[in-house]
Image (cartoon, rainbow, N blue to C red):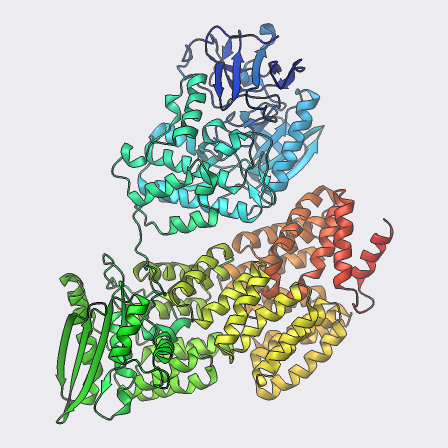
Amino acid sequence: MPRTSPRTSFLWCPPRMSAITPAKGPSQAGGSSPRPFCGSHQIPLGSHTARGHNWRYTSNLPMFCPHCGESTSVSVGRCPACGAALVQNTIATGVVPFDTTGLPPGAIFGAMTGLGTVAAPGATIEVAVTVDATGIESPKAAGPLKVGQAFGPRHHIIKLLGIGGMGAVYQAWDAELSVAVALKVIRTDAQKGASSEAENRLKQELLLARQVTHKHVVRIHDIGELDGIKYITMPYIQGHDLATALRCDGKLPVAHALRFARQIAAGLQAAHEAGVVHRDLKPANIMISGSGDDRQALITDFGISASTDQATSGSVLGTLEYMAPEQATGGAVDGRADIYAFGLILYEMLTGPRLVAAATPQARVDAMKQRFDEGLVPIRSLDGSIPAPLEALVMRCVEKDAASRYRTINELDAALARLDDEGGLIPIARRLTKPMVAASVAVVLMLLGGTYFTTRRLVTPAKAHETVPVLVTDFDNRTGETAFDGAAEQTLAIALEDASYVTVFKTTDARAIASELAPGKGGRITRDIGQLIARREGIKVLVAGAIEKRGSGYRVEVSATDPASGNPIATTTKNVGAKAEVLGAFVSMAGSIREALGESKTEMAKLADAETVTAASLDAMSAYVRAQALQIAGKYTEALPEYQRAVDLDPRFGRAYAGIAGVYANYFKQRDKAEASFQMAMQHLDRMTEREKYRTLGKYYLDVAGNYEKAIETYETLVKLYPADDSGHGGLALAYVLSGDLPRALPQVRQALEIYPRNSLQRYNYAMYSMYAGEFATAIEQASRVRQENPTLEYAWLPIAVSRLAQGDVVGAREAYAGVAAMGAFGWSFAQLGLADLEMYLGRHRDAIRVLRDGLAADVKRNDSNATARKYVALAEAYLAIGDRNRAIEASEQAAKLSPRESTLYPAARVLVHARKYDEAARIANDLDKKLQRHTTAYARQIQGEIALEQGRLGDAIEAFSDAQKRRDSWFSRYLLGRAYLAAGTSHAAEALAEFERCLKRRGEASDAFIDDMPTLRYLPPAYYWLARAQESVGSAVEARKNYEQFLTLRADADSPDPLVVDARRRVSMR
């Protein structure tokens, strides 16, 4: 019978089973039988009505201190023995028991609530706790295992770390791994219903948490059962939880709070990307490891997590103090609930813990209701030193209406990226009616980017200035010398845009508008036409110029005006004695314009100190401008000799060398020639502006050094200093993709296109990244736009063809490859590789061999080693598929000799492994490992793992694949880890299932598995077969049949015999 407590208190629930009974109310007439609940949980006592529900808490029992176990009265606020505060962490509601043992060592337990279905508004839900006082044990004595006990042959219990209602967590020694681990078990003294619930929760935690691989997420190692006790193991984290840190330290410095916030957001991003919503994010579920500047935040406890594939509703799960409004009412819950909790956590890191004010249960629920109804007090009203942008970010996270928060964790992460380490806003380019963009040089140099690092401190461009969009018109060349045309404007634009706040409207876009405004004039941008363009596009400054002959010298003039009013801003003239001095004059005159735009004297002094003329030769600059124009038009083979002419005329023209390197790296895929040109470029960094230096070294890190982490660092610096640099955003996007961080890449490439919509390269990249993300319709749409704007770019057909094939449109894919084949020798060669990939995707390997042989003959004749190597790899895979082992080995070895690219070496090594040439494959792995880059070492581990898998060393294989995944989370790492888990037997089928499900969710990444503009969709179909095998192993027969049938549909016309096809047909026929 429910009882009403005469006074409000907290109860520490002892280890023996208590009973929770629901009150009779409008939705519960007749009541309900008691349900089990127990285990070192603090239960609030008292009563409160909130949001249409009447909550009553009752108890007449003594309590135990959670710290020392001393018995005390329910009415006292502190333990008389140790002085610890007797304050609850959990509110017990409804009738479903819950578990709080998912935290690693050092965390606070008992802070999570699992609630049953919410009663209808107005219903009374009453919680009554009754315990036989004579049977109460101290929390310290609870737990199914004892310190010092051997738990099977592998684990030895070191100490009890925490205990919850349905389980306990121990520190244990893992004899097999020779490390300490956290061992989580289900309590054996729980009643059957609770045990079943705990087992379900344990399985849920395993299945969901295993899907999340990230350095800021605690990963589950293993699951097992011994002597009737189910357990999981996790890393043992040396440290403490964030809740403890906040209780001890109060609020954190802004820089520390933001560092943890970025790490937590990164972990959440990985979870949401894996399809997992945490739903119980709170300081107690965030571990802090390390010390000083090396401290790391790690997210733990996925015990009540849910898949993001469908929003959950009808139940209340989470912790009261960090619960989103939609969670508390049993509404639909998605990733925005995690964003709400993230906001509360960041709020507390900046202002201190909120929970100290809630000293009673009623105050606690009042605080929840007040938070829902009124929101939180603005941060700056508590601490005026907190930057306003940081406050705005936090307050948006904790909006009551989920629709008003950040829509996704990716959007939140992007917002965090716009803040500096102290919470201030990093200046970004202002969006105009048509996007403003970088200087004319950046139009062509869109392939180039990077950060310039030397032992000296770099000149940092001014940032504290509103973005100023500028249009440079065609200068009035009165000399009759055509060498000045384009070169003068280009030089001035480069110098102007060395200021971070200046963004120069793309000349190509301006000419297109000029052709509309003045048809038949050749798109010339006169002063009058320029004024019309500037008014139409919202450009603030119009720059015009003139060059005329004066005796043996020249007189040059530059003027800047306000296009809206026509009022002059600045005019400057200069007389020079020789033609060779003209370009230098324009550089110095740019300083006068920048000073008139409000640049500080300090920055102008820096400009004077760092004044640089990009090219010493006017003719060299003219050739460079022509090369840029050709490269923008996608005419790479024609651009290359113009760049070469530029360096012939000026051997110290660093940016021209960088242009040559970009063409070799991105179009011809010839890394050795690209490296040689980059080396020449870097010998002449002194001839570049700061912005050019950033771009050049960034591109070097990407295309030659393969140091993607360094590329990310440098591009982030570039876009921080020059927010309107489209090539910087594009380069950062590519660096993210190559490092395996696709979610962060898409916003960057979109930003590049907002700045410069006609950037064909970045639109092509957007199409490719969309294809990687599985957004095939978007990929086709964007690539089609590239085809319209730049019909000479052969690569634009790639996302169209592969995306059509992924959508099941085989005919459409063939048509796309036919389109690229008609574009010349390079296009025909590219099409043969694509058609071979298509045939192998369908299981027709003999047809693929015929296509590849024809393509190889042409590639060898053209002396194209890169194209030859790619086809040899595909040919080796095709031979292996039909059982021709010797030819497969020969083709693989040929590929490895021809190209040092990872996209050739890794698949060649895979063929050698499956052809049982383990030593040869191991040598390739060793070579990749010596490159010391994260992605190359990841490939090395994957090769080593496949060797181990083929040799039956499953433990070594799983370890190698897991290590590879940590280095770079690629599609192949997931696929191979799934294969290894499945080979380990039914006890690991759940892990295999999670990996293969992830492969299918990330199927777009299989389209170009090595991120090298190379079709590889042939790797995808077997994933359906292996997913079905995993589903079959865990008892999901219906789902398994669906995936077997999907695999057989894709391979309906496969060559015979195909072992996987034969086995799939057999398994389907047995059902």
Instruction: Please identify the quarter of the rendering in which residue 360 is found.
Output: top left
Residue 172 against residue 77 in the figure, above or below: below
Q: Which one is in front, 165 or 150?
A: 165
Determine whether, in the image, residue 424 is placed left or right of residue 206.
left
Is residue 221 visible in this depiction of the protein?
no
Residue 110 against residue 888 in the figure, above or below: above
Determine whether, in the image, residue 742 is placed left or right of residue 1063.
left
Residue 565 against residue 39 in the figure, above or below: below
Instruction: Please identify the quarter of the rendering in which residue 381 is found.
Output: top left
Q: Which one is in front, 696 or 405?
A: 405
Q: Of all residues shown, which one is farthest toward the right?
A: 1070
Task: Please give the name of the residue rendered at 60% of the width and 55% of the height, measured from the top-left corner.
Answer: 1002
Figure label count = 0
Quadrant the N terminus occupies: top right
Task: Please give the name of the residue rendered at 48% of the width and 32% of the height, measured from the top-left corner.
Answer: 325
Determine whether, in the image, residue 442 is placed left or right of residue 20.
left
Is residue 28 visible in this depiction of the protein?
yes
Task: Please give the name of the residue rendered at 41% of the width and 80% of the height, measured from the top-left corner.
Answer: 660
Task: Please give the name of the residue rendered at 65% of the width and 36% of the height, measured from the top-left corner.
Answer: 203
Q: Which one is in front, 638 or 77?
A: 638
Residue 317 against residue 210 in the figure, above or below: above
**x%, y% of residue 1062?**
83, 60
**x%, y% of residue 778?**
55, 62
